[in-house]
Amino acid sequence: PQTICLSDYKVPAYLVDQVDLRFELFEDGARVHSVLSVRRNPESSAGDEPLYLHGDSLVLESVALNGTPLAAGDFDDLGDALVVSSVPEAFELQVVTWIEPQNNTRLEGLYKSSGMFCTQCEAEGFRCITFYPDRPDVMARFRTRIEADRDAYPVLLSNGNPVAKGDLEGGRHYVTWEDPFPKPAYLFALVAGDLVEKKDTFTTCSGRSIDLRMYVEPRNAQKCDFALDALKRSMRWDEDVYGREYDLDIFMIVAVDDFNMGAMENKGLNIFNSSCVLASQETATDAAFQRIEAIVAHEYFHNWSGNRVTCRDWFQLSLKEGFTVFRDAQFSADMGSPTVKRIEDATLLRTAQFAEDAGPMAHPVRPASYMEISNFYTLTIYEKGAEVVRMIHNLLGESLFRQGSDLYFQRHDGQAVTTDDFVRAMEDASGRDLSQFRLWYEQAGTPALTVTDEFDEERCVYRLTVSQSVPDTPGQTGKKPQHIPFAVGLLGRDGQPLPLLFSAGSDDAPVDRVLELTEREHCFEFHGVSERPVPSLLRGFSAPVRVHYPWTREQLLFLMSHDPDGFNRWDAGQRLAVDVIQSLIVAPEAEVEPRLVDAYRSLLRNTGLDQALVAKMLQLPSEAYLIELSEQADVAAIHRAREAVLSHLATHLRDELLACYHRNSAQGDYQLTPESVARRSLRNTALGWLLHIGDQQGLVLAQEQLRSADNMTDRLGALRALVNSDFVEERTQALEGFYQAFREDPQVVELWFSVQAASVRAGQLPQITQLLEHEAFDWKNPNKVRSVIGAFASQNLAAFHNPDGSGYAFLATQVCRLDDSNPQIASRLVTPLTRWRKFAPEYRVLMKSALERVRDKDRLSGDVYEVVHKSLA
Ligand code: DPP
Ligand code: ZN
């Protein structure tokens, strides 16, 4: 595979104004007729260079220029490209290709999923459909005619508005769609199937009525309401908060079972992985509902941040993804609990993105090179990219940020642009200089802040010294200091917030401030401080950085109960728990900090505090996070220490857990308010802890809850508690009963798989191997693969990191197997092995050799090649 570099970017030599497509869909393949209106790009200096069209897995049937078939010498079919030499200034190119969607297991381009035709063209899937300049800076108007058997495929969809339809000979029919907005090929979509339609409408701020339609297989007809409502909430929110109105007359959502990613924002025709859009109270957990709401919003928001204004090249992927993730996070915060949303996002970032940023695939938010772009749909591009936009929001404030986004949309509507264009719009609207800030796009690695403090009692001055450093990452060393918004507050002895005075004598100072770090070291003095305060640092996780400060356990306990910043209250609890667990890793026989037990006791009893926050505070830091925090992770020791703390807490807090369980037991109808979600979370956490220590009363409660629950959150909560217990017989029975009740529902079966695969008690390797042979397992379905193999390798860490190396060997085998059918999925799955340098030597050796086995596989895909070679380098 070749390395593609940002520095080699050139504008396209040819532009396409109009694309006319005609699809003839059959059971044994599809014929694609394409007519491109092409002209030379006046901005290109390339002169009369040949026309270069990408292609992948295509059979070329014919090619003609302005109606005249081209002779063999006039073009080259290179396999991955069609090159036509000596073309005029402007011309029409007619190309006919034959493809086989029914055999497309990569799920890129046009493929079949449970009997329906569907597409996935981002990033480079369109070239699997026809020859085309498949790059996002080529934007064209598309007209698409789909022809198929009328009975088997009554619904035929593409982007834009339907403009014609009719019957054809032989029981076939057609529909023609026209999309008035020029778009890159990655936003093209086509769906053909026997689908039911759920309809709704939305009236925009200017009074236009939009047809909303959701298309699903008949068995899913009852699982659409939530997504349609979420869509309407998103449409309203984007008008209210960003002034963005929807632009076509129709907006469609389709659910498909086999999908590599979560969802796709194709213009006017969003295609979703079923698990990210279908939901009912009986089958979806609270977490699933929240994820669906966020993804529906995310894809909808792309209509502006991604489609109307798109990316110039794939190095700019975070232009649309970072901004859109930031927008969907704001939306979710507005729909639910902002503090909880922030905690969830920071947890993901600190656990998984920090690990990526410290690993062999570390890359900047705007990468400088790649081999396979699908490997760059990463947490760094998405989540860190969103944090970068959030920091701009923090630095500019709500109103200037909105002016910046208005300017960005207005200035670049209909264009394919860069992250730099985005930052420039923010600068121009606000008058702020963001030149140093741009390093966030260019430098990889997580900045680390080291904070020290001094209190000068005589002068009543409290001094904070903050130094920053950005670690080396592959190919990048000697980095410059970045522009970091660092939100802080100071708390007095009784927990009261202290005014933050930068000089003596002034009054009316705020109680929290955003300090702007730009140098390697900064010193901040706060005046009029009469007692040594406790600092509350990086409030609200104001920047995606690590903070090192020598907190004492007293200080953390104090912040846990006094910090007015909800995020930092939670964070103090996490830091304390980490500290306690880490001390048990070093000294397994040591006593568990009694003050931790007291702190959790008061959390369990505290009904005055926001229960959604309490629910989060009760979650112990995950094993994955503890691994991320260690230098040379000893997984077995981490697992043992964390389990010991959990058992200790559960044993000492048994009465409080039972009380918490009963206090939060179901009352009334199922609701999705933050309060009800928190109640279920608290109850199920309590249940999980009780079963963890084999409590008999807990067992009775879990079995009863499993029987009587009226929603999937509680049912799965009970099942998970049982699966993670030592009640072997009861958990086997529970699993069997659950499967029999839900075997017809793929989304629930995925939950059922992953609960087992993620459990150290029920998901040791022999059991995982059995799951792969289960009747419901399907190698061709990415969700099933993720729910067993993915859950095992990324959540069941003690089993995956079995010191005998069997977990690694297993993963290597599955990756090799999947690489032949679906390289994108294989490349994702191999990630845990690529982190081998993070682990203690005995693990490292075994991980590395598993990785080498993958490297040595025959016909390794470019996707896996890149990841494996970079991580062994
Ligand atoms: N562009 C898509 C998304 O993130 C990729 N799956 O929404
Ligand atoms: Zn996206």
Image: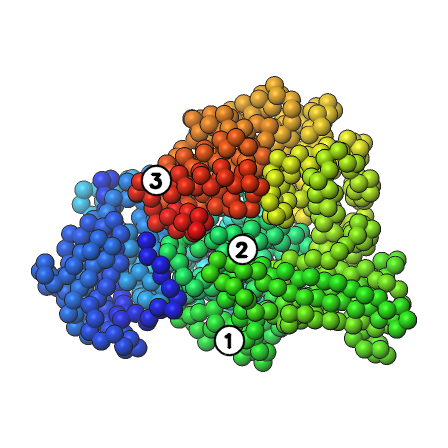
Q: Is residue 155 left or right of residue 251?
A: left
Mark 2 Cβ inside 8 Å of ligand 1:
no
The amino acid type of the residue labelled 3 equals Lys
Q: Amino acid at mark 2?
A: Asp
Q: State whether residue 569 is above or below residue 428.
A: above
Which quadrant of the structure image shows residue 544? bottom right
For the residues bearing labels 2 and 3, Cβ distance under 8 angstroms: no
Secondary structure of residue under mark 2? helix
Q: Which residue is mark 2?
A: 357
Q: Residues within 10 Å of mark 2 (few under 14, many from 20)?
A: many
Residue 468, horizontal then vertical, whole percent: 64, 65
- Name the residue at the top extreme: 729
Front label number (1 vs 3): 3
Quadrant for residue 526, please give it. bottom right
Q: Position of residue 504 (x, y in %)?
A: 84, 78
Q: Which residue is mark 3?
A: 857
Disc 1 residue crowd, few under 14, some 14–19, many 20+, Cα 10 Å? many
Tell me what residue is drawn at x 32 percent, y 53 percent.
Answer: 1
Disc with the residue nearer the chain's start (1 vs 3): 1
> Under 8 Å from ligand 2: the CB of mark 1?
no
Q: Name the residue beneath numbered marker 1.
A: 424
Instruction: Report the side of 784 relative to 560 (left or right).
Output: left
Q: Nearer the viewer, mark 1 or mark 2?
A: 2
Q: Secondary structure at mark 3?
A: loop
Q: From the viewer's side, name the closer residue of 91 and 336.
A: 91
The span from disc 1 to disc 3 (Cα, nearest Å) is 46 Å
Three-letter code, disc 1: Arg
